[in-house]
Image (cartoon, coloured by chain):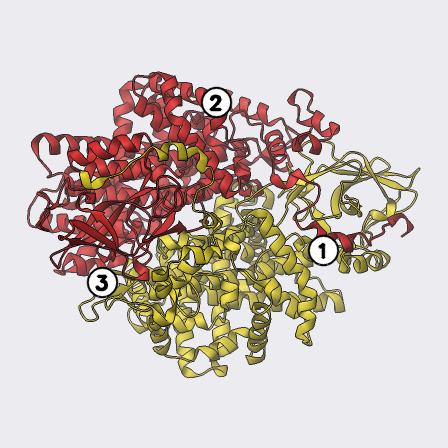
Chain colours: A red, B yellow
Amino acid sequence: MSAQARNVDAHTRALVEPSTAVILASTSDPREDLARERSKASFDARELENLLAGGPKSASLRRRIVDAMTSNEVFSKRGKYFDERDELYVRTLKMYLALPSAVAAMNEKEPIAVARIMRELIDEPGGLDLHLGMFIPTIQGQGDEEQRKYWIPKCVKLECIGTYAQTELGHGTYLRGLETTATYDESKEEFVIHSPTLTSTKWWPGGLGKTSTHAVVMARLFTKGVDHGVHPFVVQIRNNQNHEPLPGCTIGDIGNKMGYNAVDNGFLRFDHVRVPRRAMLMGHSRVETDGTYVPPPVAKVSYGTMVFIRSDIVMNAALFMKKAVTIAIRYNLVRRQSNADKATGMERQVIDYQHSQRTLFPILAMAFAFHCTSDYMRRMYFEFQKVSREKQDFSALPELHATSSGLKAYCSWMTKDAIEACRLTCGGHGYMNLAGFGTTLASYAPNVTYEGDNNVLCLQTARYLLKMYRNTIKGETPPDVIGYLKGTSSRSSLALGSTMRDENAILDAYAHRAWRMVTEASKVTGDMSPDDAMRVHMVQWIRAAKAHCAFVVMYNFVIAYEETRPRVSATTLLVLHRLVCLHGLCGMDDTMGDFLEDGYIDGDQATEIRAEIFRLLAEIRPDAAALVDSFGLSDYFLNSALGAKDGDVYRRLYEQVQDAPFNKRHTPPGYELLQPKLRRGTFGVSRL
Amino acid sequence: MSAQARNVDAHTRALVEPSTAVILASTSDPREDLARERSKASFDARELENLLAGGPKSASLRRRIVDAMTSNEVFSKRGKYFDERDELYVRTLKMYLALPSAVAAMNEKEPIAVARIMRELIDEPGGLDLHLGMFIPTIQGQGDEEQRKYWIPKCVKLECIGTYAQTELGHGTYLRGLETTATYDESKEEFVIHSPTLTSTKWWPGGLGKTSTHAVVMARLFTKGVDHGVHPFVVQIRNNQNHEPLPGCTIGDIGNKMGYNAVDNGFLRFDHVRVPRRAMLMGHSRVETDGTYVPPPVAKVSYGTMVFIRSDIVMNAALFMKKAVTIAIRYNLVRRQSNADKATGMERQVIDYQHSQRTLFPILAMAFAFHCTSDYMRRMYFEFQKVSREKQDFSALPELHATSSGLKAYCSWMTKDAIEACRLTCGGHGYMNLAGFGTTLASYAPNVTYEGDNNVLCLQTARYLLKMYRNTIKGETPPDVIGYLKGTSSRSSLALGSTMRDENAILDAYAHRAWRMVTEASKVTGDMSPDDAMRVHMVQWIRAAKAHCAFVVMYNFVIAYEETRPRVSATTLLVLHRLVCLHGLCGMDDTMGDFLEDGYIDGDQATEIRAEIFRLLAEIRPDAAALVDSFGLSDYFLNSALGAKDGDVYRRLYEQVQDAPFNKRHTPPGYELLQPKLRRGTFGVSRL
């Protein structure tokens, strides 16, 4: 008998079988609640879903992929939330290993796109993640042709599994502080890779702990006694036959983290490990056999990849915001909690508490805004890639770098906070793993730290803003997006009544704030160097960068709304307009001081903004269910007992907890410690 | 050979032995960094520690308890961050079982206080938590004398282990929605306990999943067909000999949560389970043998306990804020990250980034503020307990209830966010379990949900504020704390220059904001009933309640500062004054719009507030190490590789990861899936 069957008595089984569910008159059926909510929508959710997915074909492909995965046992997520770490590791490894055949079975024209969607749906980074996401791309991007030909086929056949070893125990953000050395020995035509200090221990690389046989090691290159800075070396670290660390390599796992535990993040130390000269990836710079160092032709040529990875983070921000708010809105629609309503005799749906709406609907709107922003970033990136390849034109790089840095920071911060805010609208149940928030937050959290700590990235954006501001003062014309640097109106045109819903007037407010903050930070900066400015006035410059990013997000949302206008029905457009305005006005309300401080708006306008927000919330309320449906997120992806499409929350929770490992036995672990005491007890309450 | 020894080669061992550590000239020794930081302090940390602990005797008792626990293997936390769930459960269970003898061995006059400190130091709720914290207190508080005499000795001897089963699958916050029934059958003088629906399943009680043999079940009492509302019943749910669920009881664990996994939160269903009449706890209301219901003499008599639990949450808020900020400040003091400083040749300490200070020092100050607030709440509670017992005077209850509700919400929100903010100042390493933030946050997080959802609690405070405001308008004099309801000055006296550090002027600003928000919310409320007001203007009333709580915290901080004045040295007092001002001014800066909106401060004052904050940060900077030392938190309690007192971060991290379970073998779990592919690989890079 299964654990589940053992724990569910007949009485209960009758209840959890939907067909025979015994429901008190005063208790609603959550499935009916959600169905009724869908029927109230003012627009066609499928139309909006197709728009967001990039057309009905993409939406349909996505659904076919979900079907294929849910009918393939290897991809099952059943019981995943109760996995111990080794189980989670193996479960995820199996999924990744099954990807090639699953992609092939789909027989689609674009297998790479299918694989990408499948990984997104698996929604769990695993031991092979860095092999696919960093080791292979680094060899492709930084190796020379011979090196690519040598390594890539082995990588694809998994004859080697690689990781990317950059960060060290004492060195993360500041790349130039890395201590690992690669010293060229021309007598043997070899590099000696060495970890000279404890703090030089490589630390964090995913898949390094146990999975990898190879690593791209970022080490400080010395030839003929000269330090040439950090370069990449492909180093075998484990024996291919039995997986033992090779001589001179000390390797291990760094243990559990807040999340990401299907990944074996690891540490790695080298004790004078020798590798051949050609272990150095020589696509850009080279070391000749005699030790002559040949520098790369164009410095910082690899910035493009970083921009791409950061635009990916913005896209993911939209995705995870959608995920969290889908779960939260669906549960808030079916969860009831209050005095019985006089009309229906039922407790009120939690979504009808003003606070739930004020929390969830702005997140819903922001998910749309981020969706549009990531579209914009990808277009910007591909445009740059085109002109940089075709015309060797790198002039867009500074703006691209500044924008992607700041948006990566802004969007990942907002998303991390949004996931938690969504969870908190779900009461106690939001805290259960089965809700899906915990693991989503835990796995999402590193986004604010990796690929550049968010505050440091904001300073990158700030440097650019400072430079552009100085140029603008000198009479240069700033690029379109930061046209506001030329100056803005000093008073908001947002006024009482319907004109509060003027998306351009709202956008003006964001531009004005960004202008004011950049101007003020520049003024206190005076003619300091950018380095000094970012150090001495760091907090102020981070605020300026955030204000700029908030503007860019709003800017993209407004542009996307304009572009969408001719392509959708009037009903859908009206809904989108509410979201644009809600996003803009709530962003103002949350930081109202920024707009009040210099009198750009006054107290009456602030009051009216809040009143308009409440009107918008009420108008969006009937569309809440349909709006999250339009994200097209499958139950398989969501993996949430609270957020499934049918709304059948309580039956799902009850069924799924039966799988919890503690339920395999009636006794707790360590019962032998309790039993001798408990056995002495005799109870006869009736004699009291 | 231990896993650790296997993984640490000789080269590495030399590095991690402090005595032989090889340190590059450019790399600092973190232990020296922290020692130097301590020596820079402007005040005596021990003096402040004694003050916070309530005198040198208390501080010394605390240290003796830590010594006793660290020298007792059963309390060891070694490897805890890598525990799987059953290991964590058993580890914690053993600690709790060892408490009585450990307390006895201390041979102190107040064993209960010792036990409380020991549980605080264990810092992990376990399977026995609700037995100690809810089952026993409920029987003591709600049972009659005979019932107490019957149950308490059995509880103490662990002949039974109990839990408190209130929340249901579909019912949490709204107590009156509970569905479980207890129907009196006078023919047999028994109650029939029953779970009529799926949503009536008891859900969440700690220790219910596997540990408990008994439960206080909160069920809707029916006698003679009349519903008397929710009452407590002691029900045996598991067999005392073999721990099997008793007939009619379906019980299980609800599986992993974001944290709290040493606790077996469970579910429980009853299928017409019969218990004797005396299973009902009859300290307040009773059912006679013939089914006559005798109601309690004073309604809501149990509010006192709730107030006490909430004041405990405020005290814990201070404790966990101290914990997080101690870890973060210590690591920020030793972590270096930047271009090498010209003077020292070393990278800059991360604490010297303005952003770190602006994040961490206000949290440091807030920990002091919460410390003072929890002192205040406890005094308020004990005063109430005294007059209510001695004089049957319950008149202070409304204020006590309102204050404790709001402060529980405010302090737990702030603390949860502060833990995460502290983690984020620690870069990637903050994400490792060994840092201590992850588990601290995960275990702390439920504080914002349990014992009353924070938003609902804010509305309790708001109701009180609305009522008091209406009374004040009618001419009544409000209680001291909310004297501001009579009106405040309309312009802040905070002005340029040194007067920005006027704690009373800052407090006035908090009072003014609270007054304005209560007034405005009351105005839109008009003569609505409180119920309607809290529903229709919920968001506005929550904001008003938060503003009131921010005022109360600042109020207590200022009062405590005044009271401390004659008791400490001038140097310590000066440091405390900086913290009071920093707390007040940062709270204003973070919500500046609240003070600008009605012109209470203007843009120039806002600018000056920020400037003053930066001056305060710079002045507090040299005292950072000593200030967290003054919290007197032991390494045992902190359990953080980043936050230990000696600053030896990197050696500790490196040593501790050797215990990670994945490091027991060279191969990953599931290696058999990879080996066939990897074995095919041959590598000869030198031939490239």
Q: Which residue is tagged 1?
A: B302
Residue depicted at 14% across the width and 30% down the height: A386
Q: Which residue is tagged 3?
A: A536
> Contact (CB < 8 A) between labels 1 and 3?
no
Where A347 falls versus B632 (above or below)?
A: above
Give neighbour class at mark 2: few <14, some 14-19, many 20+ (Cα, 10 Å): few
Q: Nearer the viewer, residue A242 or A312?
A: A242
Image quadrant in which you'd find residue A657: top right
Q: What element carries label 3?
A: helix
Q: Which residue is tagged 2?
A: A72
Q: If the image is split into quadrants, where does the N terminus of chain A sit? A: top right
Where B45 falls versus A236 (above or below)?
A: below
Q: Which amino acid does label 1 sit on?
A: Ser
Q: Distance between the residues labelled 2 and 3?
A: 57 Å
Chain identity of mark 2: A
Asked whether residue B624 is in view, the answer is no
Give neighbour class at mark 1: few <14, some 14-19, many 20+ (Cα, 10 Å): few
Residue depicted at 54% across the width and 43% down the height: A431
Q: Which of B219 and B681 is in front in this view?
A: B681
Left or right: where B630 falls relative to A36: left
